[in-house]
Image (cartoon, helix red, strand yellow):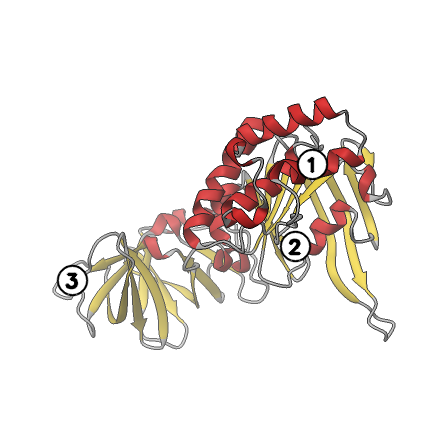
Amino acid sequence: MSALVLKDLGKVYADGRGTGVTAVKDVCLNVEPGELMVLVGPSGCGKSTLLRMIAGLEPVTRGSIEIDGRDVSRTPPKDRDVAMVFQNFALFPYMTVFENMAFGLKFRNVRKEEIRVRVHSAAEILQLTDLLERKPGKLSGGQRQRVAVGRAIVCKPKVFLFDEPLSNLDAKMRTQMRAEIARVHDQLGATIVYVTHDQTEAMTLGQRICVLNHGAVMGVGSPLELYREPQNRFVADFLGSPGMNCLPGRLTRDGGRIRFQIRGEKASLVIAPNADELPAGVWDRDLELGVRPEHIGLAAPASEEPDAVEASVDHCESLGHETLVHVKLGGARLIARCSDDPACLPKGGGRIGVILERVVFFEPGTGQRIQ
C-alpha cells in the first residue's frame, strides 16, 4: 500500500501562439495508502490528463508527483510501479485470458511458476477461473473489463489507475462492475485513483472524491461531505441527480420567522425559526440559497401549513422509487424529490416548504459557500 502526493501539479499544452493551453492547474492532492480516490468532473475538466501524468504518459509542466515518498515526476512509466486500466480494455484478441493477464509479467522477467500463481490468484478474486482459456471475442463486456483489471492486479503495483473503465458498458453492467471493483479494493487494500465523469460512480465507489473543473480542484472530501456540505456552487450542482437548487435573493424578517426573498419575485420561502441558526455574514446583502431536492417539503393546495408558499407544479417525473416534481415560483424554478406518488399535487397547483437544516448559502459572485 502506497501514498500518492501531487504538489502544485500543472500541465500546459503548446498552442502555436506562445501562450499555451492549461489543462491542469496547480493541483495539490494527497491519496492515503489503501485509499480509493475518485477524480470526477465534466468532460474536458482535465481528469484523464491528470491520471496520465501520474502514469507517466503525459510529461509534467510544473509541480511534482510522489509515490511512496519518491519523486517520480520525470521517471519513465515502466519504473513508476503503477498499473493502468483503460477505457477500451486494450486486450489482445489473439491471446487467451490467461495470456492477456500474464503479458506484463513476461516483460518483467517473472518466473513462469510465479506468473501462474499470480494469474490464478487474480482470476479467483475476479471470478475468471473458468474463462482463462477463452479469448476476448468470446467474453461479455463485463468479463473483458474484469480481465483488464486482472492484468493490473497481477503486477502488484503500488498504485492502480482506472481511466473511465465502465463507460463502454450498459447501465446494468456498470452497476455490477462498480460492486466488483469495490469488492476487489476491499480484498486487496490497494491504493486506487479512479477517473469518471459519472457522479453516481463517484458517490458509490469513492472513499474520497476530488471534483475538478477547468483543470482546477473545486472540492475534496468524502461523498457525503461534498454532497451535504458543498464547498462551492459548482460542487453543489455537479454532485447529485438532479443537482442542488440555487436561488438568488436576500434574507428578510417576518415577525418570528426568517424568509428568503427570491430576487425579482413576489415569492419568499421560510427558512429558519430564528437568526441564531444562520451562518454569520448573511444579512443585508445579496445571496444565493442552495437546497437539495429531497429537502424541499411539499404540501397539498388545501393545506393550512403556515410556512408553505403558493407554487405552480410544472410537471412530474416518476422514476418508480421516487418522483421528481418541477415547481415554479413565478419565474424561479425548483426541483423537489418525493418518495411516493404526489397525487395531491395536480398540475397547475401546489404548495412548497423548505427544510431549514439542509439549506446552504453561496456568494453570488464567486460561488463560494458562506460558512
| Mark 3 / mark 2, whichever is N-terminal | 2
The alpha-carbon separation of the residues under discs 3 and 2 comes to 43 Å
Q: Quadrant of residue 344?
A: bottom left
Is disc 1 placed on a helix, strand or loop? strand
Is disc 3 placed on a helix, strand or loop? loop
Give the percent coordinates (x, y) of residue 150. Answer: 61, 36
Foreground pick, 107 / 68? 107
Give the percent coordinates (x, y) of residue 13. Answer: 80, 64
- Residue beneath the point at 80% across and 33% down: 108
Q: Can residue 20 be seen in this view?
A: yes
Q: Quadrant of residue 49?
A: bottom right
- Residue beneath the point at 41% across and 60% down: 242
Residue assigned mark 1? 159
Mark number for residue 326? Answer: none
Number of labels in the image equals 3
Question: The disc labelled 1 sits on which kind of residue?
Answer: Val
Badge nearest the viewer, 3 or 2: 2
- For label 1, the crowd category at 10 Å Cα-Cα, with few meaning under 14, some 14 to 19 and many 20 or more, is many
Badge nearest the viewer, 3 or 1: 1
Residue assigned mark 2? 47
| Mark 1 / mark 2, whichever is N-terminal | 2
Residue assigned mark 3? 343
The alpha-carbon separation of the residues under discs 3 and 1 comes to 51 Å
